[in-house]
Amino acid sequence: MVYKSLLLFGAPGSGKGTQGKIIGTIPGFFHCACGDVFRAVDVRSPLGKAFLEYSGKGQLVPDDITIELWAQQIQAMEKAGRFKPDIDFLVLDGIPRNVNQAKILCSSLDVHRVFHLFCPDKAKVLDRLQRRALKENRLDDINTDVIERRLKVYDQETKPVLDYYGPKLITEVNTDQWPYQVLRDILNDIEHYRKPVH
């Protein structure tokens, strides 16, 4: 099965999770975040045990295991009737996380648009991440050094995915504005490119 997809891309704190959740409530869109996939893992299954082997040691989960877990989650949502691939756009957030994952997924995803959410004000990004860490009780993430390390990993591993998809698919969205304005920009773009050309 090939899924028609929209990708939400951006550094930690860019707001992609917030936008994904909102868009996922709109009929015709199904939001899947990588974090949700990991949280839904059945650690008793062989794949779940393999996932736990890495995540339990604080190591990155290998790409093939990540993609397999993602595929299982999507298929489960399909079977449950929550995701209807014949009519729904799949809105992905946090996956693919690197170029290798994008290559593995190329036979499963028909990517219509990549929304690059960026915030030019670094102080705002730090503030968002620290507030989120407090709200979600992720106290490690309050540390500025930890945030800087995550941003560096994003630049090195995840940002190159934008080059993989190329400028024709990418829409730049400035998130240094109210969330509803960011949502407006994304939906306006979807509306624009979906209109038939006369």
Image (cartoon, helix red, strand yellow):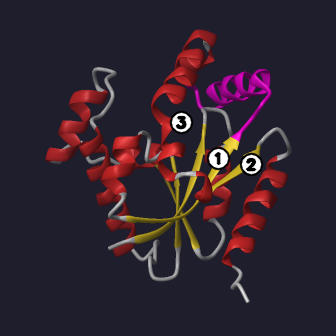
The residue tagged 3 is: 159
SS for dot 3 = loop
Q: Amino acid at mark 3?
A: Lys
Is residue 59 rendered magenta in the image? no
Relative to 143, residue 72 above or below: below
Q: Do residues under tags 3 and 1 come within 8 Å of each other at their CB atoms?
A: no
Q: Position of residue 147 (x, y in %)?
A: 59, 19
Query: Is residue 198 something one can see in this rendering?
Result: yes
Whether tag 1 and tag 2 are in contact, CB under 8 A, the answer is: yes
Disc 2: which residue: 173
- Residue shown at the point (48%, 26%) measured from the top left: 156
Residue at 32% over, 64% down: 107
Indicate which disc, 1 or 2, sits on the residue closer to the N terminus: 1
| Left or right: residue 114 compared with residue 123 | left
Residue 55 found in image quarter:
top left
Residue at the spot of label 1: 116
Q: Earlier in the sequence, mark 3 or mark 1?
A: 1
Instruction: Estimate the x, y position of residue 69 in percent, counting from the top left.
Output: 29, 50
Q: Which residue is drawn at the image coordinates 28% and 25% (left, top)?
A: 56
| Front residue of 177 and 172 | 172
Q: Secondary structure at mark 1?
A: strand
The location of residue 136, given as percent across then percent down, is: 60, 32
- Looking at the image, residue 100 sits to the left or right of residue 122; the answer is left
Magenta range is 118-138
- Measure the C-alpha gap from mark 1 to mark 2: 6 Å
Mark 3 burial class by Cα count in 10 Å: few <14, some 14-19, many 20+: some
Q: Dominant secondary structure of the magenta stretch?
A: helix
Relative to the observer, which residue lies in front, 130 or 59?
A: 59
Report the Cα–Cα distance between label 3 and label 2: 15 Å
Most distant residue in the left direction: 46
